[in-house]
Image: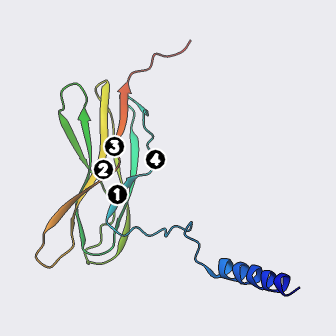
């Protein structure tokens, strides 16, 4: 009988210990480092020549300042790059910031492009800069024939 009592006590202790331990599956939504994400483009997305498209980004810095936020399009065949400035309210004060910026583009040539967003992040008093880049997306632009 004492054996069952000890086994029950051990079982209860294990249940209490398991319920008190931290859940490591929980993810902190705040990044530890500066990040930039393109929020409305998917890999393989097609843009129509001559039609405006708005590309949106979200930048986060835990400290420091944001400088020169841009979209960078690299033409796949020649590696030629085209940069477009991201526009929006960029805080002039240093510190933790989350900023939404966008750029309006109008493709004028057909082709395959690699798209990335980037900005320069200064996080120390000496002004040393790091370039922060987003995930790379393969996008295309082309003309569509009207359907009759």
Nearest to N terminus: mark 1 or mark 3: 1
The crowding category of the residue bearing disc 3, from other C-alpha atoms within 10 Å (few below 14, some 14 to 19, many at least 20), is some
Which quadrant of the view contains residue 123? bottom left
Tell me, yes or no, whether the two marked residues, 2 and 3, touch with CB atoms within 8 Å: no
Which residue, given by chain and number where applicable, does mark 3 sit on? 136
Q: Report the Cα–Cα distance between label 2 and label 4.
A: 12 Å
Identity of the residue drawn at 24% across and 71% down: 65
Q: Could you tell me which quadrant the N terminus lies in?
A: bottom right
Which residue, given by chain and number where applicable, does mark 4 sit on? 40
Nearest to N terminus: mark 2 or mark 1: 1
Tell me, yes or no, whether the two marked residues, 2 and 1, touch with CB atoms within 8 Å: yes
Q: How is the image coloured?
A: rainbow
Nearest to N terminus: mark 3 or mark 4: 4
Q: Is residue 148 above or below residue 80?
A: above
Q: Report the Cα–Cα distance between label 3 and label 4.
A: 13 Å
Q: Which mark is residue 117?
A: 2
Identity of the residue drawn at 31% across and 65% down: 34
Provide the secondary structure element on which disc 3 rests: loop
Tell me, yes or no, whether the two marked residues, 2 and 4, touch with CB atoms within 8 Å: no
Spot occupied by residue 2 in the image (x, y as percentages of width and height): 84, 87
Q: Residue 36 carries which label?
A: 1
Residue ranking furthest to the top: 148
Q: In this view, does 71 lie above or below 113?
A: below
């Amino acid at each position: 009988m004492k054996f069952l009592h000890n086994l029950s006590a051990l079982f209860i202790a294990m249940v209490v210990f398991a319920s008190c331990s931290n859940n490591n599956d929980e993810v902190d939504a705040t990044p530890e480092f500066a990040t930039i994400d393109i929020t409305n483009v998917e890999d393989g997305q097609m843009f129509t020549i001559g039609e405006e498209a708005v590309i949106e980004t979200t930048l986060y810095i835990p400290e420091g300042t944001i400088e020169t936020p841009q979209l960078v399009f690299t033409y796949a065949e020649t590696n030629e790059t085209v940069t477009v400035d991201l526009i929006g309210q960029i805080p002039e004060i240093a510190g933790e910031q989350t900023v939404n910026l966008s750029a309006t583009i109008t493709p004028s040539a057909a082709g395959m492009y690699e798209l990335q967003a980037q900005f320069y992040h200064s996080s120390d008093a000496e002004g040393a800069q790091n370039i922060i880049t987003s995930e790379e997306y393969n996008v295309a632009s082309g003309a569509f024939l009207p359907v009759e």
